Amino acid sequence: MPPDAPGALSATAGDTQIGLTWTGASGATLYNIHRGTASGGPYTTIQSDWSGTSFTDSGLTNGTTYSLPVTRRLSADAVLPAAASSQANPSATVIAIGASTGGTEALRIIIESLPPHAPPVLVVQHMPEGFTAAFAKRLDATAAVEVKEAVTGDAVLPGRVLIAPGNQHLLLRRHGGRLSVQTIGGELVSRHRPSVDVLFRSVAQAAGASAIGVILTGMGDDGAAGLVEMREAGAQTIAQDEATCVIFGMPKEAIARGAVEHVLPLTQIPHTILRLTQRRKECAPAVF
């Protein structure tokens, strides 16, 4: 059973489908239903964002006993409570980027296009534990900016890209006028750890209108809710367009929720980030 399953459905197929009722379900909570045999995994997700108390699973093998674990679909609240955004230090821009399927190539194109003193960039790429360090190392060898797998306490500085480690959420933290990151475990959020929603919420809270949020190619909707929060906090927001996405799931959902100001081809995103950053500098109030 998946480790965060609060309950499971179990039945033997008398035909090719099962009708199931789960008393643990609540209409106020979204669940994901997975299928495996009674002997254990591997499990396949067969229904996402389910909110009912009954479910029919079709296409089964007659006479086989199945286990159908039910897992909660958690929001960023499970890791980081909602809070007001920060309005401090409006002249310092922070870039937050979220990506999934097809994202490694999209990130390479963006990061390799950044100049040495580009604004700091925080990245969540859905990737298993153990792969993100190698991914960061490859990009560091080809980019003009520093690229590294994030570690708690890393300073958020111009010319630096911090990539969330696999199986760890990445959060932006403010300590007075200084920004750093924190990596933590915790629940899967929007079915992922690291979660784009968690990163975007933390950036909305710590950087507010000083941030730019970017959502790239990927399956599902992780990041859509967080990008809404960033925009509501005054951040500028960008989504990769359908034509250049491998999977137009995450950007499509963010656009549908009204989270996106600019929908752009992948190759235009780096230039737009730099243009928006320069515009923010020019519009920032003078400090005397």
Image (cartoon, rainbow, N blue to C red):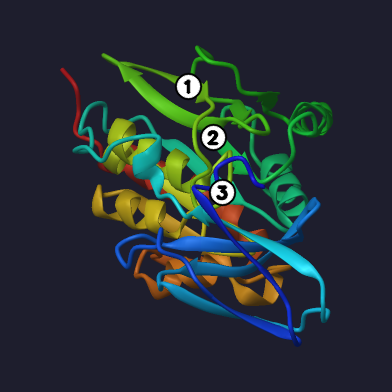
Local crowd size for mark 3, using a 10 Å CA cut-off: few (<14), some (14–19), many (≥20): many
**Is residue 59 or residue 102 the one in the foreground?**
59
- Residue type for callout 3: Gly
Residue 122 marker: 2
Q: Which residue is mark 3?
A: 98
Local crowd size for mark 2, using a 10 Å CA cut-off: few (<14), some (14–19), many (≥20): many
- Residue type for callout 2: Leu
The Cα atoms of the two marked residues, 1 and 2, are separated by 9 Å
Q: Which residue is mark 1?
A: 181
**Is residue 61 or residue 253 the one in the foreground?**
61
Q: Is residue 71 above or below residue 118?
A: below
Q: Is residue 268 above or below residue 86?
A: below
Q: Is residue 281 above or below residue 57?
A: above
Which quarter of the rendered picture does the C terminus lie within? top left
Is residue 120 visible in the rendered image? The answer is no
Q: Residue extending furthest bottom?
A: 15
- Residue type for callout 1: Val
**Helix, strand, or loop for circle 3?**
strand
Q: Earlier in the sequence, mark 2 or mark 3?
A: 3
* Proximity of marks 1 and 2: CB atoms separated by less than 8 Å: yes
The Cα atoms of the two marked residues, 3 and 1, are separated by 16 Å
The Cα atoms of the two marked residues, 2 and 3, are separated by 9 Å
* Proximity of marks 2 and 3: CB atoms separated by less than 8 Å: no
Residue at point 32% right, 38% down? 210
Q: Is residue 250 left or right of residue 34?
A: left
Q: Point out residue 79 in the picture as x, y percentages from the top left corner.
A: 40, 35
**Helix, strand, or loop for circle 1?**
strand
